[in-house]
Image: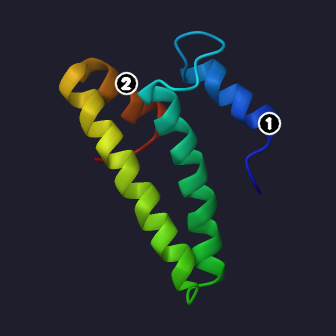
Amino acid sequence: MPLTKDRKQQLIGDFGRESTDTGSPEVQIALLTNRISEMTQHMQQHPKDYSSRRGLLRMVSRRRRLLDYVKRHNPQLYLDLLRRLEIRK
């Protein structure tokens, strides 16, 4: 299921610093987490789709870099994001 406009606005509202915040690391991490979960479901159905696997790995590494940035600048926000998004470290 692709990311709909309503779902994206909901994620921005939940994780953004204000209602129009789309560029903060928290929002980017939340959006990437949603896309990663969708891509993971796709990969379970299509295990030989190597192009999608490469895209999935790029998204995971981008999210990891953003999480490392948040951890350096605001460790408490980092822990809160991990808990809210149910990401394991």
Q: Is residue 36 left or right of residue 61?
A: right
Q: Residues within 10 Å of mark 1 (few under 14, many from 20)?
A: few
Q: Disc 2 or 1, which lies upstream in sequence?
A: 1
Mark 2 = which residue? Answer: 80
Q: Residue flagged by tag 2: what amino acid is it?
A: Asp
Write down the residue under mark 1: 5
Q: Quadrant of the N terminus?
A: bottom right
The residue lying at 52 percent from left, 46 percent from top is 32
11 displayed left or right of 88: right
Looking at the picture, tell me which residue is in the foreground, 69 or 80: 69
Secondary structure of the residue carrying numbered label 2: helix
Q: In terms of image quadrants, where is residue 25?
A: top left
Residue 78 locus on image (x, y percent): 31, 28
Q: Secondary structure at mark 1?
A: helix
The x, y position of residue 26, in whole percent, is: 45, 27
Q: Looking at numbered disc 1 in the image, what kind of residue is underneath it?
A: Lys
Task: Please tell me which residue is depicted at 35% across the width and 56% down the height of the picture.
Answer: 61
What's the mark number on residue 66? none
Which circle, 2 or 1, is nearer the viewer?
1
What is the quadrant of residue 52 in the picture?
A: bottom right
**Label 2, label 1: how far apart the Cα atoms are:** 25 Å
Q: Is residue 86 above or below residue 78?
A: below
Residue lying at the far top of the rendered structure:
18
49 relative to 28 in the view: left or right: right
| Image vertical order of residue 23 relative to residue 53, above or below | above
For mark 2, does the 10 Å Cα neighbourhood hold few (<14), some (14 to 19), or many (20 or more) residues?
Answer: few
Q: Which percent across, then down, holds residue 87?
A: 40, 45
Query: What colour scheme has been applied to the protein in the rendered image?
Result: rainbow
- How many badges with numbers are in the image? 2
* Residue for point 46% across, 38% down: 29
In the rendered image, residue 86, in percent from the top left (x then y), is placed at 45, 41
Lateral position of residue 61 relative to residue 15, left or right: left
